[in-house]
Amino acid sequence: MTVFKHWELLKYLTEREIKARYKQSFLGFFWVVLNPFFQMLIMSFIFSKVMKVSNLGVPYPVYLYAGLLPWLFFANSLSNAAEELVENASLIKKIYFPREILILAALLAKVFDFSLSALIFVLLLIWFKIPFTFYMLLFFPLFALQFLFTYGVSLFLSATNLFYRDVRYLLSLIITLWFYLTPVIYATELFPEQYRWVFRINPMSVFINAYRQVILAHNWPNFQSLGLGALLSVIIFFISLRIFKKLEGMFADVV
Amino acid sequence: MAVISFQKADKYFYFQHQRTVKELVQALFIKQKTVEKMHALNNLSFEIQKGETVGIIGKNGAGKSTLLKLIAGVSSPTSGKVIIQGKVAPLIELGAGFHFELNGRENIFLNGVILGLKEKYIKEKYDEIVDFAEIREHIDTPIKYYSSGMYMRLAFAVAVFTEPNILLVDEILAVGDEGFQQKCMRKMEEFKKKGVTIVYVSHTMDTVKSFCSRVIYLEHGTLKYDGAVNEGVALYKKQL
């Protein structure tokens, strides 16, 4: 496995991503935490006070946050990873190391952001007196699956954005549409029944439903849909990795 | 022992006529050409032995940089084989991977691991690297405040401490002040004595003559001459 062989490189590249970003922005660490937090506040107000979403079993802010955080991790990772190779052009032209390390480092930096925001989520759980149960530990394997899926899509996007530089603009459009077709601000049950198959083939929706199941409903996730989501993730990962490695020898020529 | 071996290596560049999906879709509708092949290196076969100092000469666009990219392993041949034995240190556009927001110390470690060094080894050599670069008093300053001379010294220092078997040099000596240039040259002579293989790309024939023991002369991606320095340089000068 290349990751184990190059773990020091991975460590330093991840550190670079994190440090460089926090040194640049004035608010530093608060920024990544405040951004999703304010999104959650405004969305909570809109959907529980203006649009009046029906009772979801838990207070809406918690329900929303449980979906919003993993979603933001996914969306931010993709847009970051898509530009990762282009941004590291000078490296790619000169020194060889497996290029997927760059993508992985970008994603790990986002995991760091996600963990900071997750602390706020934990505080929110305490505030709303949601009990802590052992089902919550299932979050970790679920997140590992989501990471694999994100990594797969990122590998594909980063390579294609190198050849066609407007892929990232296309991506922001796709992410917006994808957001509305994923149960982040609403629940699957509120969606018209004849269209719900969309959620089954959308791994992000599978993961978010599973998170809510294990963290908020204190229950096992739906293993049938989770199985399909996991299968899709693994397939997408291996296909993307193959494409990425096939194109790798040309990265230095086109970057 | 051959440390670099090109076996009928061919390199094509696929020149994309469109750089965006939008243009690509348009082009597909009106049946325009999308990619064009360009022959960058043509059927190259040669071997470089351990300890040789080889100058690569040729006009702009002859394929010199592409050759270095193949040796560095960042680009792969379209057909044929390129076999490299040992660790390659590219002294090309120094400081690749440096981050301007990070300080000197952080960049030494970052650049070191990018060049394939172990963290433990960098720790051991850290003081030597800092002294060689002569930047001890600025080591905690973000390198965006460095002068270009300091930047080059730091980058060069990290690169030479990688203890490579193969050194790729692309006219780096054209930058920096005279003192630094001499320091680089001394370091290169040191490498030469240690038996490090050096591949040197240059337009300055005087340096090639004084430094190299063999030249490879490329023209339009084909090997025009491979052998003694004086004859190769004379042949090249005739073409100018």
Image (spheres, rainbow, N blue to C red):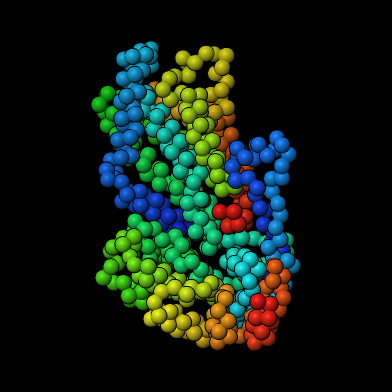
Query: Residue A37 location in percent, x, y?
Result: 31, 31
Image-based side of B71 in relation to A16, left or right: right
Above or below for A120 versus B171: above
Query: Residue B12 location in percent, x, y?
Result: 69, 59
In this orientation, does residue A47 appear? yes
Image-based side of A17 in relation to B7, left or right: left
Above or below for B165 versus A189: below
- Figure quadrant of the C terminus of chain A: bottom right
Marker count (numbered): 0
Image-based side of A92 in relation to A54, left or right: right
Q: Nearer the viewer, residue A248 or A122?
A: A248
Q: Nearer the viewer, residue A176 or B20?
A: B20
Q: Residue at x 56, y 17 (%)?
A: A195
Query: Residue A141 location in percent, x, y?
Result: 46, 37
Image-based side of B37 in relation to A102, left or right: right
Query: Residue A100 location in percent, x, y?
Result: 53, 51
- Figure quadrant of the N terminus of chain A: bottom right
In this orientation, does residue A156 appear? no
Q: Residue at x 38, y 12 (%)?
A: A54
Above or below for B129 versus A144: below
Q: Nearer the viewer, residue A220 or A66?
A: A66
Q: Which of the 4 image quarters holds residue B204? A: bottom right
Q: Which of the 4 image quarters holds residue B69? A: bottom right
Q: Residue at x 27, y 32 (%)?
A: A123
Q: Nearer the viewer, residue B47 or B59?
A: B59
Q: Residue at x 57, y 14 (%)?
A: A194
